[in-house]
Image (cartoon, rainbow, N blue to C red):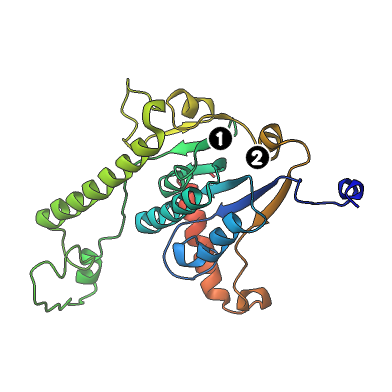
């Protein structure tokens, strides 16, 4: 019976690497296939628990999004890595920028393709000013608040210098947290002869030169190099919402797709 074990596929001697596909924009809510902690929690837990994996590999393709959700997802991955004593490797596909790179820092090692876009350690918000538009069309904007900051950055009112200053202070606080995350995870690997936290991006080897990644490598060959040619991959990925599989909730899906394409387009993708 013992001699027959080597003929049975996927016995306990076959190493397993769990693959977590983290592809898309990072945002709260359940719309489309966005990445958020609530939607990914079960998938992440299963990846670390099922089959006693030798490692968890993050397949990342994200232009970023919500800093809160980025932090929550990365923190969950780190907690489970420590609890299960399972190393984590991140593999960047097209892009791991902004919140996408925050996710990558949850890994012990970060790998990328020679043409992957990496970085954008910064904070951004954008909107429209419609005050002159409604004025031209004879529309009055009436806002009543208790608390002088409740209507901060109202797009239907002229910008106020104090609102801009307040927004920048919020950005600075989030940016500082992002920088601390990168420094705590990358440590002495980071280049010290330049500012890596301006929101700039690097491609492939350039990202390795400044310490944002550990090298150029692809998921399957790298995992086989580390765990042997017989390694088995258990892929975990989000499923499309049930209704969208039948063509329902089409307008919501289209809007989510437009938002996602806009986010990727910032990086020429």
* Tag 1–tag 2 contact (CB < 8 Å): yes
Rendered view: 201 above or below 174 = above
Q: Is residue 228 left or right of residue 72?
A: right
x then y, percent, for residue 114: 59, 30
* Residue positioned 76% across, 46% down in the render: 14
| Residue assigned mark 2 | 219
| Residue assigned mark 1 | 111
x then y, percent, for residue 79: 44, 53
x then y, percent, for residue 134: 23, 71
Rendered view: 30 above or below 82 = below
Where the C terminus falls, by quadrant? top right
Q: Closer to the N terminus: mark 1 or mark 2?
A: 1
Q: What distance separates the C-alpha of mark 1 from that of mark 2?
A: 8 Å
* Residue positioned 24% across, 74% down in the render: 137
191 vs 247, nearest the viewer:
191
* Residue positioned 33% across, 22% down in the render: 192
Q: Secondary structure at mark 2?
A: helix
Q: Secondary structure at mark 1?
A: strand
């Amino acid at each position: 019976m013992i001699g027959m074990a080597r003929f049975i596929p996927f016995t306990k001697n076959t190493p397993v690497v769990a693959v977590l596909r983290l592809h898309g924009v990072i945002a709260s809510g359940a719309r489309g296939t966005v990445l958020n902690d609530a939607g990914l929690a079960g998938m992440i837990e299963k990846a670390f628990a099922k089959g006693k994996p030798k490692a968890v590999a993050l397949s990342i393709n994200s232009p970023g999004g919500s800093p809160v959700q980025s932090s929550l997802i990365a923190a969950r991955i780190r907690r489970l890595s420590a609890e299960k004593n399972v190393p984590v490797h991140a593999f960047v596909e097209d892009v791991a920028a902004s919140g996408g790179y925050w996710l990558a820092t949850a890994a012990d090692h970060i790998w990328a393709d020679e043409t992957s876009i990496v970085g954008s350690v910064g904070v951004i918000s954008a909107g429209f000013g419609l005050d002159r538009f409604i004025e031209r069309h004879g529309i009055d904007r009436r806002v009543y608040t208790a608390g002088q900051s409740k209507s901060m950055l109202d797009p239907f009112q002229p910008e106020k210098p104090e609102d801009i200053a307040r927004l920048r202070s919020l950005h600075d606080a989030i940016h500082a947290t992002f920088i601390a995350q990168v420094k705590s995870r990358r440590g002495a690997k980071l280049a010290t002869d330049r500012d890596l936290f301006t929101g700039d991006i690097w491609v492939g080897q350039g990202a390795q030169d400044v310490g944002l990644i550990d090298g150029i490598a692809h998921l399957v060959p790298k995992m086989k190099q580390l765990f042997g040619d017989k390694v088995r991959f258990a892929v975990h990925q989000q499923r499309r919402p049930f209704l969208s599989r039948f063509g329902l909730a089409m307008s919501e899906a289209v809007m989510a797709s437009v938002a996602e394409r806009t986010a990727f387009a910032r990086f020429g993708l």
